[in-house]
Image (cartoon, rainbow, N blue to C red):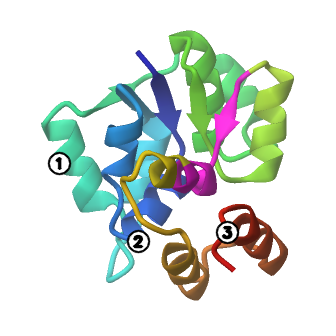
């Protein structure tokens, strides 16, 4: 069974491209922390990406809400990273997850220092393509890029080259 705990950014990204369900297809058990739940639900107006999908996934118990045990550690380091990122990393350790799904490079490096394996939105999409859940990455990555999701042109080109989509 492959367990993952997911930070805010990948859920928003997958919602933007209408592929939130990939988390549930790729991982057997998916968790989010309270801070991530709060971050997703903090936005209002038209840019409420992920709220509807997350609410449904929690209601159907496809995603479980997890409260970290070591909140003292999280509180001490809040400011170095966002609380959601810290709780995701700590939760990954506490739950013995195979992956923490995090996009931000600083948070991924921090997770690596604690021996937490990470994967980001692009990694999820690459796995989804290999498993034939999606046909190609290029239109999805371009849609993310168009919606101001932070993907550098360099990374975009590298990924498309690796996936033979240039």
Q: Which residue is mark 3?
A: 164
Secondary element at tag 2: loop
Q: Quadrant of residue 37?
A: top left
Label 2 and label 3: CA atoms lie apart by 21 Å
Label whose residue precedes the other's in the sequence (2 or 3): 2
Secondary element at tag 1: helix
Q: Which residue is mark 1?
A: 56
Residue 125: x and y in percent read 52, 56
Could one spot residue 79 in this view of the protein? Answer: no
Q: Is residue 45 above or below residue 15?
A: below
Q: Is residue 128 above or below residue 143?
A: above
Provide the residue span drawn in magenta.
116-126
Whether residue 128 sits left or right of residue 117 in the image: it is: left
Q: Residue at horizontal 50%, vertical 31%?
A: 5
Residue 119: say if magenta: yes
Q: How many marks?
A: 3
Q: Which residue is mark 2?
A: 17
Label 3 and label 1: CA atoms lie apart by 35 Å
Could one spot residue 44 in this view of the protein? Answer: yes
Residue 50: x and y in percent read 35, 60
Q: Residue at horizontal 54%, vertical 44%?
A: 7
In the displayed image of the protein, which residue is found farthest to the front? 164
Whether residue 145 sits left or right of residue 56 in the image: it is: right
Q: Nearer the viewer, mark 2 or mark 3?
A: 3
Residue 14: say if magenta: no
In the displayed image of the protein, which residue is found farthest to the bottom? 146
Q: Is residue 10 above or below residue 97?
A: below
Disc number placed over residue 115 in the picture, else none: none
Whether residue 95 sits left or right of residue 18 in the image: it is: right
> Closer to the camera, 164 or 157?
164
């Amino acid at each position: 069974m492959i367990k993952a705990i997911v930070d805010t950014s990948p859920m928003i990204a997958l919602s933007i491209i209408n592929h939130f369900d990939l988390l549930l297809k790729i991982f057997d058990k998916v968790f989010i922390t309270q801070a991530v739940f709060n971050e997703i639900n903090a936005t209002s107006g038209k840019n409420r990406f992920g709220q509807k999908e997350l609410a449904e996934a929690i209601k159907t118990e496809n995603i479980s809400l997890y409260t970290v045990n070591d909140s003292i550690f999280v509180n001490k380091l809040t400011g170095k990273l966002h609380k959601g990122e810290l709780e995701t990393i700590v939760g990954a350790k506490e739950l013995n997850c195979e992956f923490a799904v995090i996009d931000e490079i600083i948070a991924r490096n921090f997770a690596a220092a604690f021996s937490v394996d990470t994967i980001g939105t692009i990694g999820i999409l690459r796995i989804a393509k290999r498993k034939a859940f999606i046909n190609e990455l290029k239109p999805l990555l371009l849609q993310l890029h168009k919606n101001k999701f932070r993907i550098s042109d360099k990374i975009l080109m590298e990924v498309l080259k690796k996936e033979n989509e240039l």
